[in-house]
């Protein structure tokens, strides 16, 4: 049995309220072959996990992050299209970022920040 399978079985057995989301995440891992470069916006990610926007859904997302199954990426987007910098959390984002697409510094605002989620390459092992 793979590390991936052991991890999921352990989490599903010990977290029955999150079992359905974990099953959908396992399907997502299979669909994307664990590709950590596949990125999802929060609405799309919730949909892929069959979750609706709610406090309990956000607790599940936080749980998946804490267990190392998914990764949150805070991306600063260029007005000239495309991401120009990625950060682990909103508190890491500077007020000004160099936009390599335009050669200019841009002031970071809520309009040019996008929160994305990805699958992780490595999975924490639970025995």
Image (spheres, rainbow, N blue to C red):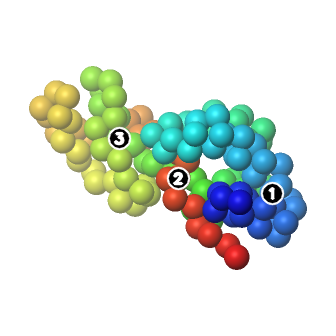
Q: Secondary structure at mark 2?
A: loop
Query: Which sits in the foreground, 98 or 33?
Result: 33
Gap between marks 3 and 1 measured at Cα: 31 Å
Q: Looking at the image, is mark 2 or mark 1 nearer the viewer? A: 2
**Residue depicted at 72% across the width and 40% down the height:** 27
Q: Badge 3 is on which residue?
A: 76
Kindly report the distance in space between the C-alpha atoms of the residues bearing marks 2 and 1: 18 Å
70 lies above or below 117 = below
In front: 80, or 16? Answer: 16
Pointer 2 or 1: first along the chain: 1
Percent coordinates x, y for residue 1 in the rendering: 71, 60
Q: How many marks?
A: 3
Number of residues whose C-alpha sits closer than 10 Å to that of mark 2, classed few (under 14), some (14–19) or many (20 or more): some
- The reply, left or right, for residue 48 in relation to residue 93 is right
In front: label 2 or label 3: 2
- Element at label 1: helix
Q: Is residue 87 left or right of residue 107?
A: right
Quadrant into which the C terminus falls: bottom right
Q: Residues within 10 Å of mark 1 (few under 14, many from 20)?
A: some
The furthest residue to the left? 103
Residue located beneath label 1 in the image:
18
Residue on which disc 2 sits: 120
């Amino acid at each position: 049995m793979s590390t991936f399978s052991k991890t999921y079985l352990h989490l599903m057995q010990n977290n029955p309220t999150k079992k359905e989301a974990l099953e959908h995440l396992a399907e997502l891992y299979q669909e994307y072959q664990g590709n950590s470069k596949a990125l999802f916006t929060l609405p799309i990610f919730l949909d892929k996990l069959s979750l609706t926007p709610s406090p309990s859904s956000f607790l599940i997302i936080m749980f998946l992050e804490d267990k190392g199954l998914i990764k949150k990426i805070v991306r600063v987007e260029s007005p000239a299209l495309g991401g120009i910098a990625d950060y682990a959390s909103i508190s890491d984002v500077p007020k000004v970022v160099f936009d390599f697409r335009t050669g200019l510094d841009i002031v970071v605002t809520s309009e040019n920040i996008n929160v994305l989620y990805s699958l992780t390459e490595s999975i924490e092992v639970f025995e």
